[in-house]
Amino acid sequence: MIRFKHFSAMALVVMMLCVFADVLWPHVGLRVAARAFLGTYLLLEWSNLAGNARVILVVAAAMSAGYVALFADPLAALTRAADTAVFFAAFFANQFFLREAARTSPMVQRCASFFVDQPPSKRYALLTLGGYLFGIIVNLGVLSLLGQMIVKRNTLQAAGGNSEIHHWRQRRMSTALLRGFAVTPLASPLSLSLAVVLSTLPSLKWSIMAASGFACGTLLLVLGWVFDRVTAPRHLAGKLGPVALRHDYRSLLGIVAIVLCTLLLAKGLERFVGASPSRAILLAVPTVGMVWLSWGYLKRFPHLAVWLIARRIRDRATITFPAFRSEVAVLSGAGFAGTLFTAFVPPDVLSAALTSHLLPTPLLPVALLLAMVGAGLLGINPIVLATIGAASLGAVHDSDLPKELCALALMAGWALAINSSSMTASAMLLADVVKLPSPRRLMGWNAAYCVTSTLLLAGLLAAASVVQQTFG
């Protein structure tokens, strides 16, 4: 018997298929169907949505009603906003395929154990690298995966009964994981943040944004390692004796290879199919995920592989896709509201606001960075401000505006918001997994690093903006 949750899962799956097909064979009918199925999914899951997800959908609906009432021909703007909402929802939901392949992968489990089973001098670096790499593949799932490893390895018995060693292990491993995961919006070429800026600012080049984001992300990872070394409790060194080393670089290289394969496939689709970078990634992620998932079945059960894979996807999709409800609602609602916001405000007004003499143009990227961090501290999802900010930048045709740096600031602010706010899903999930009494404890450990990294990136953005304005 088909249950209620199966209908919502089917609606999201069909929406994704329509989006994938539209990338390869653009047709207005596919876009209309995708909008209808996203709306169906949100209606079916409305009663189970989180409060903030309902709020943003209500805001989006109110903006739609206002736009219809104020403008004579609202259809073009509303359909553009709806298409943005569909794209964001599909971009998030298609992570299911990589996450599902990683969920039971022996390579992932070996790699996770390898990150944790290290002496303190290496553990931080590998855990923060793991948080970043796994964050690219499984998104928030990395916090559960590696967080559970931390809990299993960091028992009081493993610490020799020393509560101080237990505390410092928990602190250093938790902050390493959070800092590594937090740079994915900035340094991941497959991130939603990059998709947001590329889809709303099509003049930006994927290679430039990905490279500059990766450079800034690497800087944050190195800064985190420096903080760990400086704050490490020297008086506890050697109290437990030498730790048995685990060497499994092959598994680590396997994870890197999956990320690189996804990137290469996306570049191939961009070149040979003519898809935009963000839509090429949209197709590459589920393709690589399905190949990865199929590999094990084809080796072990070649005659039953297709049936087993189809059954697993069906069974897991009916569990996972309904559980995506609040994230899909927030992302699609923010995408819709952000796009419609720029339709409400004339481009010349946006241009005047963004290039106001009250704020020198070189400081605009810094202002956007700080606004993203401040919004995160207030509990506002970074996607909301990032979408509105990117859409506003896209509506301005001022050649002097440093759009690349502004887009980089939005991505960097997203990363810093994850690092600094105790009200983000990542902070609450990690605190729960590693059994902290409150996410505020985690943010307290991370406070000095967050302040320093914010000042560092703000200074770099200001300097780069001044150089661009001067020599531009």
Image: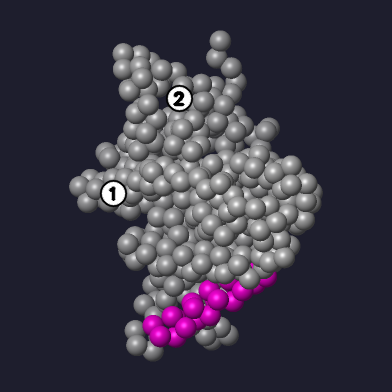
Out of 332 and 146, give the one closest to the viewer: 146
Residue in the image at 58% along x and 54% along y: 119
Magenta stretch: includes residue 127: no
User: Is label 1 in a helix, a strand or a loop?
Assistant: helix
Q: Where the C terminus falls, by quadrant?
A: bottom left
Q: CA distance from mark 2 to mark 1?
A: 25 Å
Q: Which residue is mark 2?
A: 313
Label at residue 291: none
At 49% from the left edge and 30% from the top edge, which residue is drawn?
104
Residue at 51% in and 54% down:
126
Can residue 142 be seen in this snapshot?
no
Residue 170 can be seen, yes or no: yes
- Which residue corresponds to the image point at 44% horizontal and 55% vertical from the top-left? 188
Q: Amino acid at mark 1?
A: Leu
> What type is the residue that disc 2 sits on?
Ile
Figure quadrant of the N terminus: top right
Residue at the extreme front: 241
Residue 295: percent from the left, percent from the top? 34, 28
Q: Most extreme residue toward the left, as rendered?
A: 272
Q: Position of residue 299 (x, y in %)?
A: 33, 23
Where residue 347 sits, quadrant-wise, is bottom left
According to the image, label 1 marks what residue? 264
Give the main secondary structure, helix, strand or loop, of the magenta stretch: helix
Residue 180 vs residue 319, the one in the foreground:
180
What span is in magenta?
448-468
